[in-house]
Amino acid sequence: MIILASHGQFAEGLKQTAELIMGEQKNLFAFSAYCNGVDSVKELIRQKILVANENESIYILTDILGGSVNTEVLSLLNEFPDITVYSGMNLPLLIELLTISHLDLYQTLDDARKSIVLVNELLHHQIKEDDL
């Protein structure tokens, strides 16, 4: 199970984008704080964890490390110590989690970091190479 949690509609937008690319994902859920009258997503996430299969891995992705949503999710670790929490969620990380059955958590995080690129620099190097 993968749970996305964010300020505003970011989580829902990320879910929709992933499903546009990969099709419907039955174990992907999004919770948005501070919109539609929802300030806290903690109890919504807690309820989703409670209905998960006993042996199911649970990954929670939040938008900002140390933000209110991330802080709420981290407070669930006392009750659910086996969940894995990532902060700084992005589409490459989500796709990686959706497509790999056995995860090396550190490799997954490293792969997601490598997907963040300063494109201007890439273009600059490409132009220099083309000039040679």
Image: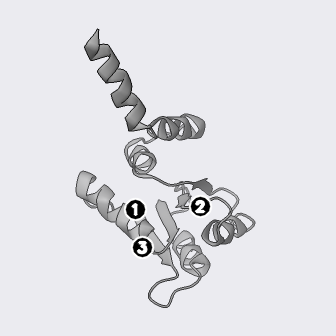
Q: Is mark 1 on a helix, strand or loop?
A: loop
Query: Residues at badges 2 and 1 in contact (C-beta under 8 Å)?
Result: no
Q: Quote the CA–CA distance across marks 3 and 2.
A: 14 Å
Instruction: Specify the quadrant of the image occupied by residue 96.
Output: top left
**Place of residue 13 in the rendered image (x, y in percent of width and height, measured from the top left):** 36, 66
Element on which disc 2 rests: loop
Q: Residue 64 carries which label?
A: 2
Residue at horizontal 64%, vertical 58%? 65
Measuring from the top left, give residue 18's x and y in whole percent. Answer: 32, 56
Q: Are marks 3 and 2 in contact (CB under 8 Å)?
A: no
Characterize the local packing of mark 1: few (<14), some (14-19) or many (20 or more) Cα atoms within 10 angstroms.
few
Q: How many marks?
A: 3
Up the image or down, 59 lies above or below 114; here it is: below
Q: Residue 104: percent from the left, percent from the top?
A: 55, 36
Q: Residue at x 49, y 91 (%)?
A: 37
Q: Is residue 26 visible?
A: no
Vertically, is 113 above or below 34? above
Label 3 to label 1: alpha-carbon separation: 19 Å
Read off the residue under disc 1: 27
Q: Residue 48 at x, y = what percent?
A: 51, 73
**Mark toward the start of the polypeptide (2 vs 1):** 1
Kindly identify which residue carries mark 3.
Answer: 9
Residue 12 seen in the current view: yes
Q: Which of marks 3 and 1 is in front?
A: 3
